[in-house]
Image: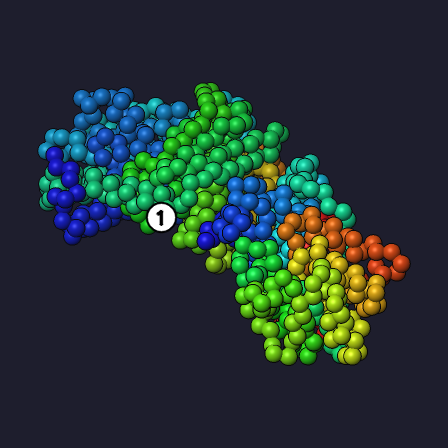
């Protein structure tokens, strides 16, 4: 059940209790009754970011923008005194890498969709928030003929949860693997699919950032020497902190591995 | 007397309730046609309403909500002051004391009892904003006033007409204390005329339908409005919302508001608001209540009969000695355009936050404006006569963006605006331009309405100068504020450029596009009196509407249209909306790339 709170925010009651979430990407900010702003992303801009006639406010006021940390939709814009303290996040994550636009070659790139099983159809689960954005991205990739490979946890095989979440509209020719490990290369099925195709780049999506994504991306770059692309809004975790520290970890891996991992957003990926 | 809804059939109820509404509207039309000054005749800066015998609001026309509520307080104060035996048929009372029931002295209430068969059955009341009231500054709004004693005539309630006979000595005394006796006299008489119209129409109605039936209908009208409003309030989830408004002059004054919605009640609590000011921005308690009433009227009750039923679910808490409940002798003369604007902003903003939590009401949410700057001018006109007037710009604010549509360009004010030619014909001024200010509207998925900017100079002024008075909401946060991600509108400003090349421009017959072409020294004017001489140019920019929602979600075709209309520059289209416009066409690919990059930038950790 949902109740509107304001544009792009709603109060949602699911299996994990009542929470405040983004209407657009379903990212969960906090529990109901808590202040959602500390769980958002906030940035300070000069007043003229709102237009050239705001120049008179220079030196006295600044714009504080509050956005969804997952999809970037703007939730609030305030003209505040320059001395007003910024909203402090509840936790202080490590410095996260900066996403940028990327072009992927269709013939050499595969998309990995990790652990987005039918359980993600439950709006109460964190991975549910990824469905709208991922579904649109996968359609774009299909149009460019990119191979797509899904993973589902081995523990779900033989249960009603063994299928890929329906909103992702998996095609018959898109394989599903059931590795028994956080690292989806475990058991060899994934590499067996990738190796004969001449793929040299993988786009890693799915949930959670701090489990399947972190370990699979690391193995892809370190062991199999793939170029790895991580769209930061195509992966998520139960907390913003876990999401941020995992991306940070990928960005500092030693031995040249970090140079093979790049960060972007789903909308900033183009196919050639 | 019967007072049961069941006793009135619905057809009779509809006919009589609409007839009462039409009487109130006819009172307003009378004010416009008989009045003297532009406020009354062209700008609808007036109130006309009917009240029950005990002072409860019975029916109001197209009146300003705050004054409608204060009119009810004024009727009750007249009843208290004169007692039931002191109110006779065909009496007319005058009241303008802000510490009794008026908002500021310039607003003169005229209150008339309506008797039928010798019994007091109703009241009519009007106010007009007279163009002078004998205050420190011409026009009434007095930046230099530090006490109410500097702000003109103060009348706690007098009988101006006694049993149908005008007390001419009193009338002459009052208008003689103003700078514009003829115009003020005309405005007082238009109020008398409007009240006479009400009395005539009401007596006819009472004769046709009988006092018992009309009383039952009026009680039902009030019950109906109250019941529907309470039901609507109850639909919204209980909650608490807060807002702060600010005025920045030589000091900073803040109005703080917490709105609590409990069941079918709304509690506006102004605890924490700054102490009363020594500038005339203070708003007496009854006016603070009236502004909250007005905010509810405009948001949750705009389609209901305007009467006392809308009063009842509202509670207002305003600590004594603050800007929102000052004690004498705190000055108040500038409050309608400052304190009242801030209170209206805070009340409306909190109500909008509340509406956003309900599926049915969230589409009613719109961005609210904080206020604007205003200017009055006075001096000897081209006909050799002393005059006082205002720039009449207040109606050309940009309206706030709505949840489904842009705000109205130059249409955010509640009043009307005279044309430039009329103003130039009557006053010694020349407009250099009056136009929508480019890039003024707050950006958003739906943008705010663009406010108007004006440059003007004196023309054919025998004394080669006129006087100006700058008032309104001083500060940079005085325009429309965005909601739910929408950006604020550009600040409303008043600037005076001295020693410009204006006369050179006029000599060469050029048209002015950019004020910077004129040179000179430009100063921003806070609350002050000032002088405009022949080489000076006065620039004003009205408030613009705040935006609604994320500008990156705005339809790029609408941005293109705004660029073509000159409301948004090509640079702002790119920087604010992420829309790349080349010539009059959109570069779709570049726009998509830019918007994706701007979103990615937001997802990245903020600076």
* B338 vs B602: above or below: above
Return the x and y of residue A19 as percentages of the image width and height: 53, 48
Identity of the residue furthest to the front in this view: A158
Would residue A217 be seen by someone viewing this image from the given angle? yes
Q: Residue at x 45, y 53 (%)?
A: A1
* A171 vs A5: above or below: below
Q: Residue at x 21, y 32 (%)?
A: B53
Return the x and y of residue B237 as percentages of the image width and height: 42, 44
Between residue B183 and residue A6, name the one nearer to us.
Answer: A6
Return the x and y of residue B512 as percentages of the image width and height: 63, 56
Residue B198, image quadrant? top left
In this picture, residue A103 sits left or right of residue B4: right
* B486 vs B384: above or below: below
- Chain of the residue displaying label 1: B
In this picture, residue A243 sits left or right of residue B546: right
In this picture, residue B492 sits left or right of residue A57: left
Would residue B307 be seen by someone viewing this image from the given angle? no
Q: Quadrant of the C terminus of chain A?
A: bottom right
Label 1 Cα crowd, 10 Å radius (few <14 / some 14-19 / many 20+): few
In this picture, residue A251 sits left or right of residue B401: right
Q: Secondary structure at mark 1?
A: loop
Which residue, given by chain and number where applicable, does mark 1 sit on?
B302
Q: Residue at x 39, y 42 (%)?
A: B296
Residue B264, image quadrant? top left
Q: How is the image coloured?
A: rainbow
Between residue B189 and residue A14, name the one nearer to us.
Answer: A14
Return the x and y of residue B426 as percentages of the image width and height: 46, 46
Count how many numbered circles sit on residues in the image. 1
Q: Residue at x 28, y 43 (%)?
A: B227
């Amino acid at each position: 059940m949902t109740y509107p709170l304001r544009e792009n925010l709603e109060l949602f009651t699911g299996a994990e209790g009542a929470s405040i979430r983004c209407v657009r990407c379903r990212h969960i900010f906090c529990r109901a009754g808590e202040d959602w702003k500390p769980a958002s992303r906030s940035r300070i801009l000069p007043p003229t970011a709102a237009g050239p006639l705001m120049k008179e406010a220079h030196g006295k006021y600044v714009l504080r923008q509050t956005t969804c940390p997952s999809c970037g939709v703007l939730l609030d814009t305030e003209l505040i005194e320059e001395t007003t303290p910024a909203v402090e996040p509840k936790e202080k994550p490590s410095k996260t890498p900066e996403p940028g636009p990327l072009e992927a070659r269709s013939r050499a790139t595969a998309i990995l969709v990790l652990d987005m099983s039918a359980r993600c159809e439950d709006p109460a689960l964190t991975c549910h928030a990824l469905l709208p954005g991922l579904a649109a991205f996968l359609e774009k990739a299909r149009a460019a003929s990119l191979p797509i490979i899904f993973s589902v946890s081995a523990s779900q095989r033989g249960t009603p949860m063994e299928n890929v979440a329906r909103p992702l509209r998996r095609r018959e020719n898109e394989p599903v693997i059931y590795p028994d490990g956080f690292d989806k290369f475990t058991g060899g099925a994934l590499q067996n699919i990738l190796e004969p195709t001449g793929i040299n780049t993988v786009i890693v999506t799915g949930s959670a950032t701090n489990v399947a994504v972190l370990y699979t991306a690391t193995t892809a770059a370190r062991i199999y020497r793939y170029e790895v692309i991580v769209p930061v809004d195509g992966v998520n975790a139960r907390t913003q902190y876990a999401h941020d520290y995992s991306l940070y970890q990928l960005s500092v891996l030693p031995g040249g591995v970090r140079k093979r991992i790049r960060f972007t957003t789903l909308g900033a990926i183009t196919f050639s | 007397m019967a007072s049961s809804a069941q006793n009135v059939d619905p057809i009779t109820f509809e006919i009589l309730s609409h007839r009462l509404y039409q009487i109130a509207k006819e009172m307003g039309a009378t004010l416009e046609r008989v009045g003297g000054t532009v406020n009354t005749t062209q700008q609808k800066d007036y109130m006309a309403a009917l009240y029950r015998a005990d002072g409860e609001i019975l029916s109001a026309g197209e009146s300003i909500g705050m004054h409608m509520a204060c009119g009810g307080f004024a009727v009750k104060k007249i009843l208290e002051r004169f007692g039931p035996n002191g109110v006779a048929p065909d009496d007319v009372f005058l009241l303008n004391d802000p510490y009794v029931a008026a908002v500021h002295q310039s607003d003169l209430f005229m209150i008339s009892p309506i008797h039928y068969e010798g019994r007091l059955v109703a009241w009519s009341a009007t106010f007009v904003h007279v163009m002078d009231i004998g205050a420190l500054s011409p026009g009434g709004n007095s930046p230099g006033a530090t006490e109410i004693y500097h702000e003109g005539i103060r009348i706690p309630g007098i009988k101006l007409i006694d049993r149908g006979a005008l007390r001419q000595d009193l009338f002459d005394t009052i208008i003689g204390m103003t700078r514009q006796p003829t115009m003020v006299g005309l405005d007082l008489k238009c109020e008398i005329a409007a009240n006479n119209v009400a009395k005539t129409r009401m007596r006819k109605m009472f004769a046709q339908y009988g006092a018992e039936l009309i009383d039952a209908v009026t009680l039902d009208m009030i019950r109906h409005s109250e019941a529907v409003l309470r039901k609507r309030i109850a639909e919204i989830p209980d909650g608490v919302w807060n807002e702060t408004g600010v005025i920045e002059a030589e000091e900073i004054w803040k109005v703080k508001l917490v709105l609590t919605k409990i069941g079918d009640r709304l509690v506006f609590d102004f605890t924490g608001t700054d102490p009363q000011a020594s500038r005339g921005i203070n708003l007496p308690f009854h006016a603070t209540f009236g502004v909250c009433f007005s905010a509810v009227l405009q948001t949750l009750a705009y389609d209901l009969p305007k009467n006392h039923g809308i009063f009842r679910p509202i509670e207002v808490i305003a600590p004594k000695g603050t800007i929102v409940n000052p004690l004498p002798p705190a000055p108040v003369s500038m409050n309608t355009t400052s304190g009242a604007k801030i209170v209206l902003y805070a009340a409306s903003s909190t109500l909008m936050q509340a509406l956003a939590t309900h599926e049915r009401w969230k589409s009613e949410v719109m961005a609210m404006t904080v206020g604007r700057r205003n200017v009055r001018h006075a001096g000897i006109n081209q006909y050799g006569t002393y005059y006082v007037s205002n720039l009449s710009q207040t109606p050309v604010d940009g309206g706030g963006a709505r949840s489904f549509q842009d705000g109205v360009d130059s249409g955010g004010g509640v009043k009307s605006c005279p044309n430039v030619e009329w103003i130039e014909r009557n006053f010694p001024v020349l407009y250099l331009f009056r136009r929508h200010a480019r890039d003024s509207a707050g950006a958003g998925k739906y943008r705010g309405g663009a406010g108007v900017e004006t440059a003007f100079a004196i023309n054919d002024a025998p004394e080669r100068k006129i006087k100006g008075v700058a008032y309104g909401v001083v500060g940079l946060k005085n325009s429309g504020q965005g909601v739910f991600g929408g950006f604020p509108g550009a600040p409303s400003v008043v600037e005076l450029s001295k020693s410009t090349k204006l006369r050179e421009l006029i000599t060469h017959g050029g048209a002015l596009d950019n004020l910077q072409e004129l040179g000179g020294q430009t100063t921003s004017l806070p609350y002050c009196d000032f002088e405009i001489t022949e080489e000076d140019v006065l620039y004003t920019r009205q408030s613009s509407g705040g935006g609604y929602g994320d500008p990156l979600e705005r339809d790029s075709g609408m941005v293109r249209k705004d660029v073509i209309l000159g409301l948004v520059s090509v640079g702002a289209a790119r920087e604010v909306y992420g829309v790349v416009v080349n010539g009059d066409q959109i570069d779709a690919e570049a726009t998509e790339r830019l918007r994706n990059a701007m979103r990615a930038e937001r997802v990245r950790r903020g600076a």
